[in-house]
Image: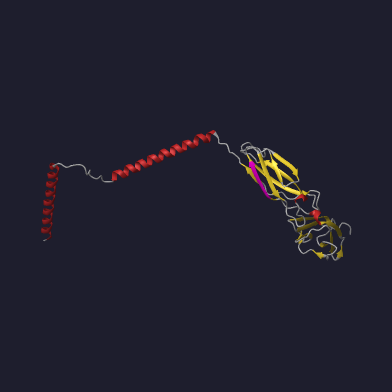
Amino acid sequence: MNGTAIENFVCVIFNISFMNCTWHVGRTATEDTQYFLYWRPSKKENITECQNYIKDDYGRHTGCRFQNVIIENKYACFLVNGSRSGQNIQSYEKKIMLYEIEKLTPPLNVSVNCTEASHRCSIWWQPPRTSHKKKRDCFKYEIFIENEADAEKNTKTASKTEAIIESNSYLYESFTSGKRYSVKIRATDAGLCLLSSNWGEWSTPVEFGSQLKSTSPYTLLVIPGLAAGLTLLLCMTVRAYLKKTYAAIPQPRDPFHEFSPIDFQTDYMNLLKNQETEEIIDVEEVMECK
């Protein structure tokens, strides 16, 4: 029946050797319709069925996941057929050149070196990884540099720089000390090799420069005031502690002070009186015990 064949068949190769193929069910397909995908990477290879289907809410096959896909300069053939209540449905066939559907991985090892005096930054990177192309001149790149957002000025970006280049380096000549920037890069075919003409994945943004945060006048007044108050409180606490500790320690006599004979005589008489009192108390205590 018309309208039972799949629609919008799309395949994408990513992360070097993984491939996903997806499709939509036919316009007149019912819930019991089921699809099956077969493919042959080249004429020299056998036809195989999908081993890892993607399913919708009704359990119908709407895609397939592949691993260890090898990209060659040859057409791969795809066939999707199926059945509905025991009856065959319209089949779908398509030939695809695999390198044309590859989504390139991000460029590798992006690094930045800036010189404040010349207001320039040198940016380097390495080509993306692929399974079939290794030459540096196979790629061209899009580089995207932006000055990061400034929350105090309520701006998302202060400036943007975009450029298409065919080398593995770029000289950024609008660097301003005290600002923070980020750069990301992606790759595509330079027209010299059999690569996809679509742009690949962006590299992880790399930040460079420094963002100087301004301080409000209120903060400049409050911070020194708090510091002075804490210092005064600490001094008063230490002083009170030392005063209390000093009073509790008995003061030694001055070894250089010479006592007069009168002082010795007074001390000796007081000692005799104390001894006599102690002897009287002892006698009285003994008598009371008897």
Using the rendered image of the protein, determine whether residue 4 is visible from the camera's viewpoint: no
Question: Is 88 on the left or on the right of 270, as rendered?
Answer: right
Q: Residue at x 11, y 56 (%)?
A: 283
Q: Above or below — where is 23 with respect to 113?
A: below
Q: Residue at x 75, y 49 (%)?
A: 187
Q: Main secondary structure of the magenta part?
A: strand
Q: Position of residue 19 (x, y in %)?
A: 77, 58
Number of marks drawn: 0
User: Residue farthest to the right?
Assistant: 1
Q: Is residue 201 magenta?
A: no
Q: Nearer the viewer, residue 100 or 152?
A: 100
Question: Is 55 on the left or on the right of 225, as rendered?
Answer: right
Quadrant containing the C terminus in the rendered view:
bottom left
Q: Position of residue 109 (x, y in %)?
A: 67, 50
The quarter of the picture where residue 289 lies is: bottom left
Q: Nearer the viewer, residue 242 or 97?
A: 97
The quarter of the picture where residue 16 lies is: bottom right
Using the rendered image of the protein, determine whether residue 137 is visible from the camera's viewpoint: yes
Quadrant containing the N terminus in the rendered view:
bottom right
Q: Position of residue 116 (x, y in %)?
A: 62, 38
Q: Position of residue 94 (x, y in %)?
A: 85, 57
Q: Which residues are drawn in magenta?
A: 109-114
